[in-house]
Amino acid sequence: MEKSNLTESLTNEAIFFNELINSKFKDGRIPLQADYRRATKYIPGNQSDEEPIDPKLFKILEGKIHDLMLNTIITNGKNVLDICCGPGGISLELARNGLNVEGFDISPDAIFVANKMKNENPYTDNFGSLKFECKDVNLIDFENKKYDTIIGISAFHHIYNLESFLIKCRASLTENGMMVTFDDIGFTKTDFFIKNLLMFLLPKRGLSYKQKLLRLYNYIFHKKKFSNEIFSPMEVWASKHDEASDLILDFWTKELTAKYIFYYGAFSGFVSGTLAGPDWFRYPISRILTIMDRFLIKIGVCRGFFRVIISKK
């Protein structure tokens, strides 16, 4: 993947996420990324390549980690900065718990959706404050601002001049301030193999076993690959799985004091998200896959595709 110049990459980044958020809001649906409480369950048909929206499946796969992350932020102080907030789901949930949240994102459409969810929010008891702004987060004015928590959900690896930006973030933290990062860090070979093996063995939405066998044949004999991870323009610029990922880990563990480090989702989310069948089949299988996933990570067989680090100043 070749880098464009920085200005072009930033412009294309906004376009990329405008298209992404608009693809999730078809027919009045609300994705989890916009509102965790009001998300609309939607399971695409077999001929659709749309992403499913399934709040119950989300709870099975990562509900405990998500809740721990939220509760840790909520109890750490009132003022929160959400970097690359997207459609604002995390920011909205924190404001519902009485926090004062500022969210920034480069995508105008994502900020439009975030404000729409904020204005439609029916959960107003104990609501703090919530402000969204469409802006390149690298241009945030940290002068005379102090935050109890700065969070980035799949965010920091989109930033140019990342080390300089992180230093500014740390300087703007209160005395016991905290930084939270959630990152997708890629597959290990073992994680990738188990994911593909399970996707082959289990029924997959939109793909018959005959089609699976044909794909396997083409992969083995023709080296044809059928799916690859998609990178946004700024993920390419920041070298998401290389320089940016390493820098984030170093900063959260060396420049801050790590409180929690979690690796999860080696294969369970990818397999469960494409499972075919009724809910009574998908949910129990997903629970089994999640338990298996966590166990294999715990004993060191798998690493996990996702990493969460919560560190204090």
Image (tube, rainbow, N blue to C red):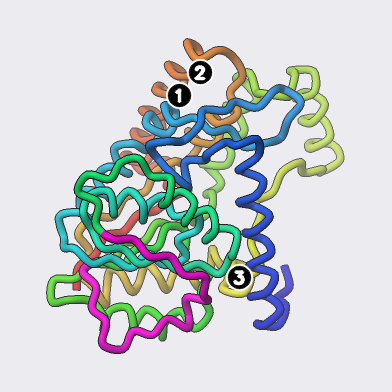
Label 3, label 1: how far apart the Cα atoms are: 32 Å
Residue topped by disc 2: 282
Quadrant in which the N terminus is drawn: bottom right
- Residue name at image x 48 percent, y 55 percent: 114
Q: Earlier in the sequence, mark 2 or mark 3?
A: 3
Q: What stretch is highlighted in magenta?
A: 129-148
Residue 201 x, y percent position in the rendering: 62, 20
- Residue name at image x 60 percent, y 25 percent: 43
Disc number placed over residue 90 in the picture, else none: none
Residue 130 x, y percent position in the rendering: 34, 61
Residue 272 x, y percent position in the rendering: 52, 28
Q: Which of marks 3 and 1 is nearer the N terminus?
A: 3
Disc number placed over residue 286 in the picture, else none: 1
In this view of the protein, which residue sits in the foreground, 195 or 221?
Answer: 195
Quadrant in which the C terminus is drawn: bottom left
In this view of the protein, which residue sits in the foreground, 216 or 74?
Answer: 74
Quarter holding residue 292: top left
Residue 212, above or below 76 = above
Residue topped by disc 3: 234
Label 2, label 3: how far apart the Cα atoms are: 35 Å
What secondary structure is marked by label 2?
A: helix
